[in-house]
């Protein structure tokens, strides 16, 4: 195995994961790498899990504050949750074991916008970061680090942590060097300057992360794969959603509001998002570019077919087949894929300047266009807001895509009033289900309701939604801007909790 650690100082710090784990103590805040299952530390969390369990067996408390880029994997979030070793967690989680502890009240979850997480750290809102644990591809002289398959919050964690543990993962292709653009120009108010990025693929930083070698207390070598999620081909529902989105974009181009090559695309994670990308791939659109968070298989398809010329993101989020394809052709992607820190990939200034077209999933929307992306029945977290708020509010055009029902039709994803709000009616522009699309731009709440009911709701729920709107309209003639029946607005959710169906 060729050495990936060519920094003379840091090559003396190579040690085992078990030893490195002894350098983390109960009560520490620990910032780990990782974003949508890519680039998270693979060995340290398991070693820490064992230390936590041993401490708990001795009757001692051992819990840490766990900060990440976004979601990690069962062998990072999962094992630490299983060890009951996490007191607080930020900013985005999709791990089922961690989710259970959050929903049982055992773990405090701070569900920040991804673009906020780094700056809130710099502002001092989260407290001191004791340790950073960051996976990298290689360690070069002078503390220059070749990042791995995600960047996330690594720059901030490396800068801010008192102590740093590096995992050098030999599984990550050494050829990843050159795929990153790490911007070191962010300053704190009142000294901030514009971020001079005017093209999605412009380089404004450098290919390496930096670390002060004096802070590095351990370097651990691994050879373990990322958590690569299986890819499900589009089903009938997601294909129908994709068709509505593509048709709408055609319409926008014909109306002269959007250029023929569209505008930089952001696509959320999940199968519906992949289906929309597949829909674009089959369409006449080409020469597209992405300014997004995650490169999923669908993006790779678009790059391979030439529909997409290039993509800027903060992370990969590929299936096993996607990873094999990427690795086999890695040189052809160089210069066409750029990974940045999440504070830049999701930066409101850049999303707005570039005029991004944002497409994200939802859990439920109400008849006035408020969107809930995070909570089930008002109280249980699903994943988190992620980057959906960063992109939605600042986009040129935003879409929310969803099947019209969930849980085998027991739940309508269009409801009288959302049980939690992530994206307000002031932000949301286009809602799309398999039944159609509601364009909410420039419309009042009373105009939106009939459109959403008619075009987006499942036919089985349409009459009940229309009936709710009509009765609310008639109930209080002086309160018709956003008519509601307050004693009934959340009754659909209560009915589901009581009976298992809305
Ligand atoms: O749960 O698998 O247990 O049945 O939610 O739903 O329909 O498979 O859709 O995978 O696209 O996820 C909003 C969660 C949608 C996602 C959300 C249940 C449903 C299923 C998933 P089961 P689907 P998706 C960039 C952008 C926030 C972050 C974001 C998300 C599960 O898109 O996390 O946008 N978004 N980031 O059954 C109860 C409802 C439901 C419901 C769906 N109304 N009530 N359960 N479900 N609707 C990426 C990042 O930021 C990293």
Image (cartoon, helix red, strand yellow):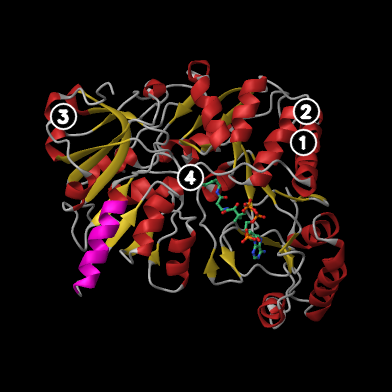
Whether ligand 1 has any atom under 8 Å from the Cβ at mark 1 is answered as no
Label 3 vs 1, first from the N-terminus? 3
Contact between labelled residues 4 and 2, with CB atoms less than 8 Å apart: no
Contact between labelled residues 2 and 3, with CB atoms less than 8 Å apart: no
Please state, as top left, top right, bottom left or bottom right, where the C terminus lies in the image. bottom right
> Looking at this rendering, what residue extends furthest in the front direction?
1
**CA–CA distance in space, label 2 to label 4:** 28 Å
Residue 161 placement (x, y as % from top left): 22, 46
Q: Which residue is mark 1?
A: 246
**CA–CA distance in space, label 3 to label 4:** 29 Å
Q: Which residue is mark 3?
A: 11
Q: Which residue is mark 4?
A: 36
Of circles 3 and 1, the one toward us is: 3
Question: Residue 204 versus residue 237: which sits nearer the camera?
Answer: 237
Whether ligand 1 has any atom under 8 Å from the Cβ at mark 4 is answered as yes
Residue 382 placement (x, y as % from top left): 54, 61
Rate crowding at label 1 as few (under 14), some (14 to 19) or many (20 or more) other CA atoms within 10 Å: many
């Amino acid at each position: 195995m060729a050495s990936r650690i060519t920094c003379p100082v840091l090559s003396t710090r190579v040690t085992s994961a078990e030893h490195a784990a002894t350098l983390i103590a109960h009560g520490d805040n620990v910032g780990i790498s990782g974003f949508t299952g890519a680039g998270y530390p693979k060995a340290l969390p398991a070693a820490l899990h064992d230390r936590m369990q041993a401490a708990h067996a001795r009757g001692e408390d051992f819990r840490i504050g766990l900060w990440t880029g976004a979601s990690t994997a069962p062998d990072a979030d999962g094992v630490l949750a299983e060890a009951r070793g996490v007191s607080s967690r930020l900013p985005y989680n999709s791990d089922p074991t961690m989710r259970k502890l959050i929903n049982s009240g055992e773990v405090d979850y701070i569900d920040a916008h991804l673009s906020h997480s780094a700056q809130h750290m710099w502002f001092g809102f989260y407290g001191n970061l004791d340790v950073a644990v960051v996976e990298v591809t290689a360690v070069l002289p002078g503390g220059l680090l070749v990042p791995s398959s995600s960047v996330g919050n690594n720059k901030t964690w490396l800068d801010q942590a008192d102590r740093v543990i590096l995992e050098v993962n030999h599984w990550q292709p050494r050829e990843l060097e050159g795929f990153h653009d790490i911007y070191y120009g962010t300053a704190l108010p009142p000294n901030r300057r514009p971020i001079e990025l005017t093209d999605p693929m412009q380089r404004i930083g450098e290919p390496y992360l930096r670390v002060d070698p004096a802070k590095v207390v351990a370097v651990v070598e691994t050879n373990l794969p990322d958590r690569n999620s299986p890819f499900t081909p589009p089903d009938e529902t997601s294909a129908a959603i994709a068709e509505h989105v593509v048709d709408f974009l055609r319409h926008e181009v014909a109306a002269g509001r959007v250029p023929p090559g569209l505008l930089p695309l952001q696509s959320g994670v999940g199968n519906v998002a992949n289906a929309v990308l597949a829909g674009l791939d089959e369409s006449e659109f080409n020469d597209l570019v992405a300014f997004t968070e995650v490169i999923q298989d669908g993006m790779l398809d678009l790059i391979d077919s030439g529909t997409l010329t290039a993509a800027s993101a903060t992370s990969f989020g590929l299936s096993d087949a996607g990873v094999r394809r990427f690795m086999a052709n890695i040189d052809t992607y160089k210069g066409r894929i750029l990974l940045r820190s999440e504070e830049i990939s999701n930066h409101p200034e850049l999303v707005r300047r570039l005029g991004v077209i944002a497409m994200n999933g939802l859990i439920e929307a109400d008849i006035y266009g408020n969107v809930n992306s995070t909570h089930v029945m008002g109280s249980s977290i699903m994943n988190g807001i992620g980057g959906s708020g960063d992109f939605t509010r600042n986009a040129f055009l935003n879409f929310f895509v969803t099947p019209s029902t969930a849980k085998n039709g027991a739940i309508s994803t269009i409801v009288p009033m959302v049980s939690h709000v992530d994206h307000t009616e002031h932000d949301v522009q286009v809602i799309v289900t398999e039944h159609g699309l509601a364009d909410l731009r420039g419309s009042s709440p009373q105009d939106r309701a009939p459109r959403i009911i008619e075009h987006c709701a499942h036919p089985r729920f349409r009459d009940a939604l229309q009936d709710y709107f009509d009765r609310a309209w008639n109930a209080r003639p002086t309160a018709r801007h956003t008519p509601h029946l307050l004693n009934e607005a959340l009754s659909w959710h209560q009915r589901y909790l009581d009976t298992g169906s809305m």
